[in-house]
Amino acid sequence: MRYLNLHTHVQTGNPDVLELVNQYPDAFDESIAYFSIGVHPWRINENRLQSDLAFLESKLSDGKCLAIGECGLDKRIEVPLELQLEVFEVQLLLAEKFRKPVTVHCVAAYQEVIETRKRMGISVPMIIHGFSKNEQVAKSLVDNGFFLSFGKWLLRNPELKTALVSVPDDRFFLETDTAEESIAQVYELAANYKNVELATLKENLSRNFEQVFNMAFPKQSAG
């Protein structure tokens, strides 16, 4: 059974890993096997925003495009939150139209993200990537229908163990994002924290993949 790297910025080509590589409309690589694509709040540029969104939509029918994102809200950047919210909402509407899951970037804006999902009646799965908060925040997100993806912060902060263990087995994923460590290292630690065999964890996350992405877990790389 292959590993699943739910969110990474680098395609390694390792045949033992299904990598969902994050892509941006303004820096797109056609050679990526499986990708998500979104307008990240850090990369909102009003001069090219409409062309970025149009390019994003043009890629959503591609069989290699598995999700929209990362997109979301970040209160610690200079881009006005109102503008971030407008761009986020456009992408959520596209996710509903094309029935794609959404990989969410969220910094200090969890209540706003939860409220936006409720207000818009979003029905596609939404995954908070790079989760790094406590058990209480995890419970609030899970109770409101979100999935959580754990990665580099799990490796760096032992206190995240409590949050991971609290999340139901059918509601989480693992990733590397920009970490230098491998997805195998993330899996090894998560299996230890969850007190399960590595093979069991792989099977569990492949089932979660099939549930969220509405497709069979790929046995080998595309292309």
Image (tube, grey):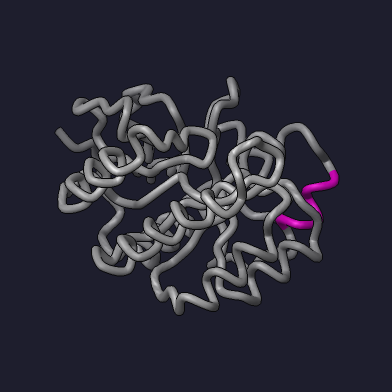
Query: Which of the 4 image quarters holds residue 9?
Result: top left
Q: Is residue 161 magenta?
A: yes
Q: How many numbered markers are drawn? A: 0
Q: Residue reaching furthest front?
A: 47
Q: Residue at x 65, y 36 (%)?
A: 78
- Residue 17 visible at all: no
Q: Residue at x 41, y 24 (%)?
A: 10
Give the x, y percent position of residue 182.
54, 27
- The secondary structure that dominates the magenta segment is helix
Identify whether 14 is placed above or below 70.
above
Give the x, y percent position of residue 25.
31, 35
Judged left or right of residue 150, residue 66 is left
Q: Quadrant of the C terminus?
A: top left
Judged left or right of residue 127, residue 181 is right
- Residue 35 visible at all: yes
The magenta stretch is 159-164
Q: Is residue 218 magenta?
A: no
Q: Residue at x 33, y 62 (%)?
A: 95
Identify whether 112 is placed above or below 63.
below
Q: Nearer the viewer, residue 44 or 139?
A: 44
Give the x, y percent position of residue 6.
46, 45
Judged left or right of residue 156, residue 12 is left
Q: Nearer the viewer, residue 186 or 84?
A: 84
Query: Which of the 4 image quarters holds residue 147?
Result: bottom right
Q: Residue at x 39, y 69 (%)?
A: 124
Q: Nearer the viewer, residue 102 or 182?
A: 102
Give the x, y percent position of residue 64.
21, 44
